[in-house]
Amino acid sequence: MEPQDPHSGSPQNQWRFAQCFGDKGEVEDITEADIISTVEFDHTGDYLATGDKGGRVVLFERNEQKKGCEYKFYTEFQSHEPEFDYLKSLEIEEKINRIKWCKRQNSAHFLLSTNDKTIKLWKVFEKSIKVVAENNLSSDHFINAPITSTSGNPHITSASSLTLPRLAHHDSIVAAVPRKVYANAHSYHVNSISINSDQETYISADDLRINLWNLNISDQSFNIVDIKPTNMEELTEVITAAEFHPLSCNLFMYSSSKGTIKLADMRQAALCDSHAKQYEEEEDPANKSFFSEIISSISDVKFSKDGRFILSRDYLTLKIWDVKMENKPVKTINIHDHLRGKLCDLYENDCIFDKFECTFSGDGQSVLTGSYHNYFKIYDVDSSSDILLQADKSAFKAKKIGGVKGGAKGKSGAMETNGIDFNKKILHGSWHPKENTIAIAATNNLFLYSTQSN
């Protein structure tokens, strides 16, 4: 299929490359620590955060001096360090699994970041550095001060000649300090954190449990979901993702490796093991295979902004669910249908276990998810049209020479199977909450695409 101009067709397909941050060298030269592991816009869209495998968090802020939606570097800090669990003889990586912004209530920013075990609440703020502008040693009156001692040192002869030191603004820096550290609450790897709409509590989920925290209390959490069996040999499923409802502070959902999504209500019981709703689609027996259970595992779930729909991603498809309809999704979008014949190879090289994220647009009209060879797909929910873009080096090369497409290879329909580089994959992305701007993590590069003219 021939590439199509992403500017042609309906307005929602008029995407263009805007920016790229990061080292633009070859894949072979990339340091493991520089690989981006999470991307997240804040609630205003004016700030953007990325976390990497080296435990660093990098923040970007909107560049108001540029037209369109462009960003500039804001600050960077080391969020997590590598640790070692001596009781379990287990090395804990510094890799940032998730970042979530708290809604801004003053001039400072607050955000949660987590690695496999420890969650931290960071305060990021602009700090004024002041220096002493003048003191008694630099006062002019000392030059004419009378010498009253044999040593030749001037002395202050009256109170009026004493000058109090004054502090003057010298510079401003952006500081990041950890306000809270929520540790020792998870026995398994943390895969999700989600802040409640009340902005007072949040949940953290690992493979078998979900804990409820108060943001102000770091030494106590409440276990609200526990699917760990008495005998671990009977373990049949794990929790893969969890998220709070955007409007109802009592509702949250979590997905499992069995392909189910469970909606729980914290008003029903302290332990939410009995779900309020379960979203699951019966598998066609004709399609059942050795890989069925692996490819049905849900890697990510997201609520729409109004909380009416749920977006879920498994290995082959993207599904949109109506919260009121549990038996089947409203829409199923094939993402990796062209890879069905390669499942055996993908199992051999472990790619079948890749966890692709998904996200709704701010208005809920579009959805976004990634694929291999640095391809990602934007799907229009109402018109059922889609566009396939590629985040690669051609994007910023084309922008430099004034290319119309901005390096984005727009395609409609299925992706090609030949020549796919499975080492290049778009696992993480985030959509601006108010505009058609998306941030895509492609290995160690952060790409921004927008429908606005820059």
Image (cartoon, rainbow, N blue to C red):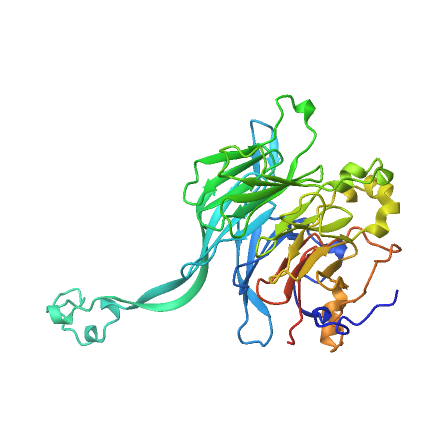
Q: x%, y% of residue 428?
A: 67, 53
Task: Left or right? Give the position of 277 relative to 163.
Answer: right
- Residue 189 sits in quarter: top right
The residue at the point 57 percent across, 76 percent down is 66
Farthest residue, direction top? 231
Compared to 37, does 376 lie above or below?
below
The residue at the point 72 percent across, 40 percent down is 297
Q: Is residue 114 visible?
A: no
Q: How many marks?
A: 0
Task: Left or right? Give the position of 161 relative to 304.
Answer: left
Q: x%, y% of residue 373?
A: 79, 56
Q: x%, y% of residue 262?
A: 62, 40
Q: Nearer the viewer, residue 225 or 428?
A: 225
Considering the image in quadrants, where does the N terminus appear?
Answer: bottom right
Q: x%, y% of residue 353?
A: 75, 42
Considering the image in quadrants, where does the C terminus appear?
Answer: bottom right
The residue at the point 61 percent across, 30 percent down is 227
The residue at the point 54 percent across, 52 percent down is 246
Task: Left or right? Give the position of 152 relative to 449.
Answer: left
Q: Is residue 72 visible?
A: yes
Q: Nearer the viewer, residue 312 or 95?
A: 312
Compared to 139, does 390 lie above or below?
above
